Amino acid sequence: MAKKVALLQGNEASAYGALYAGCRFFGGYPITPSTEVAEVMAVELPKVGGKFIQMEDEIGAMASILGASLTGAKVLTASSGPGMSLKQELIGYACIAEIPCVIVNVMRGGPSTGMPTGPSQSDIMQARWGTHGDHPTIALVPASCQEIFTETVRAFNLAEIYRMPVQVLLDEINGHMRERIELPEPGELEVLDRAAPSVPPEQYLPFDPSVGDVPPLAAFGSGYRFHVTGLNKAPDGFPTTRAELVDAEERRQLRKIEAARDLIEKNEEYLLDDAEVAVIAFGTISRSARHAVNALREQGIKAGLFRPITLWPFPERRVAELAKQVKGMLVPEMNLGQLVLEVERVVKGACSVSSLTRVDGEPITPDQIMEQIREVC
Amino acid sequence: MSRRYELRFSGAGGQGLITAGIILAEAAAIIENQYAVQSQSYGPEARGGASKSEVIVSDGPIDYPKATLVDACLALTQEAADKYSDTIKSGGLLLVDEDFVKAPPQGDFKVVRLPIINTAKNDLGRAIVANVVALGAMVALTGVVRRESGEEAVLRKVPAAFAELNKKAYNAGYDRVKALLG
């Protein structure tokens, strides 16, 4: 049978990916350039028995998906710029209470209202550190409309399996651009669900470390009752200040991601085998980089592309290995130099690291990347 | 390297240029199974302001999704012609509305003048289909998709009640170019 194909925007692809993954609740508040995610969910969710709610603001939207997730639903919200700033407090709540949820952030210029119709990649450190306190982070950065679909499905899987918020970072360009997508049939992509408790309600502890680093989450309404709080808590979910419990809890939450790096990290390596210079780029700008790498290769310059698809946790080990192979790395990004800090941190001086930044509302072009690489080489 | 063909539809916000780009991308990517990417940029205002939509068509996967050197550019307003014609490829094409772009920019490209908006207004009775007239003209000028593919994509996009009007608009644009170029 011929594959179902469609010309879809990245934002639309993200919404259809969420539906494919089994998302049945969307709480949101429209904001450019993310609004199409909400528009598709508003049309499609009622058809599959799901619920769409436009809340009073982004804080309420984030709160609504946490409540819905606690009933067992797979949940999504989408926002941008100042909307993402408002969501940060409740993203922290999702981290500490370990509530699975997916957040699509279609990045635009900032800070504050910034440039609503301009593309940006300036929220990558916000995705890592935007909410206060130590916490694990998973953020995915797909580049094409097809990949936005599949990575949104993967975001749901990761949220459910690791019981935490997962962000999908797009930008105004790949959120709004349209490409041909082959829509996977049900069963074609892996769809994972959160683990259910294996003990009866009277024995259930929502944060029981003895069952592993990701304790099963019971659904409200299924007979299990437990306490949910933003305070540090004991295994039974009630607040505690006992030093050893707080310490163990915080370390477990980071460990659940650190220990699973191999399962979470995902990169694409392009023409790196014999590369002397590596471009480290993600999302829309990785497409400029690929164009530049191809053109440079034709001119005899041994360039390659390393493209994180999982941005957080950052692929530290692989980038460190690469730094021993190449003479230099170039990090082009639509912000004033955020990812380059992470690259420098893991490269530790093993090769030169050069930064290329742009924040005028236009993408970094292949020409800009080629020019800077020629200077480095 | 794959063959990359770049088109730009430009004018004022509200003229339907993003829709024209989407229809062309649909014709190329879905109907003809070519590779295509459609993107756009516009100001925050819903109407007015310079607006552009770009479509890249290729026989292989497309990396950079925006135009680099444009093979064919449409401009429905003087502002858009002045702002967006600077990256037309040497030997490329610029299609302008002859009534609204009084002073087409000069460069190493061919300028084609057509009364696009007035064709929609006077011949078809609806200025709103100027974008579809323009689409038909761009398809005729560039041959980037087949005539029938463009028409089919138009019909897929518009509501049934407006199918006939849009079909006429598309073919009016196509035929006007063919008549002009002989």
Image (cartoon, grey):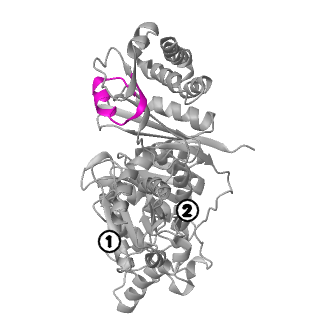
Q: Residue at x 57, y 76 (%)?
A: A201
Residue at the far top in the pictured view: B122
Q: Residue at x 32, y 60 (%)?
A: A356
Q: In the image, what residue type sits under mark 2? A: Arg
Does residue A234 appear in this view?
A: no
Residue at the far bottom in the pictured view: A244
Residues A218 and B163: in front is B163
Badge 2 sits on which subunit? A
Q: What percent of the width, then of the height, locates residue A243?
A: 35, 91
**Residue A154: image tag:** 2
Q: Categorize mark 2 by other alpha carbons within 10 Å: few (<14), some (14-19), many (20+).
A: many
Are dots 2 and 1 in contact, CB under 8 Å? no
Say which element carries label 1.
helix
Q: Residue at x 34, y 74 (%)?
A: A344
> In the picture provided, is B112 more to the left or to the right than A13?
left
Residues A127 and A83: in front is A127
Say which element carries label 2.
helix
- Mark 2 and mark 1 lie on one chain; the one further toward the N terminus is 2
* Residue B88 in magenta stretch: yes
Kindly identify which residue carries mark 1. A341
Q: What percent of the width, then of the height, locates residue A368?
A: 35, 53
Q: What percent of the width, then of the height, locates residue B35?
A: 57, 42
Q: What percent of the width, then of the height, locates residue A5?
A: 63, 42
Using the rendered image, report if marks 2 and 1 lie on a common chain: yes
Q: Categorize mark 1 by other alpha carbons within 10 Å: few (<14), some (14-19), many (20+).
A: some
Q: Please provide the residue range marked out in magenta.
A: B74-95
- Residue A232 vs B142, above or below: the answer is below
- Residue A363 vs A231, above or below: the answer is above
**Residue B31: image tag:** none
Q: In the image, what residue type sits under mark 1? A: Leu
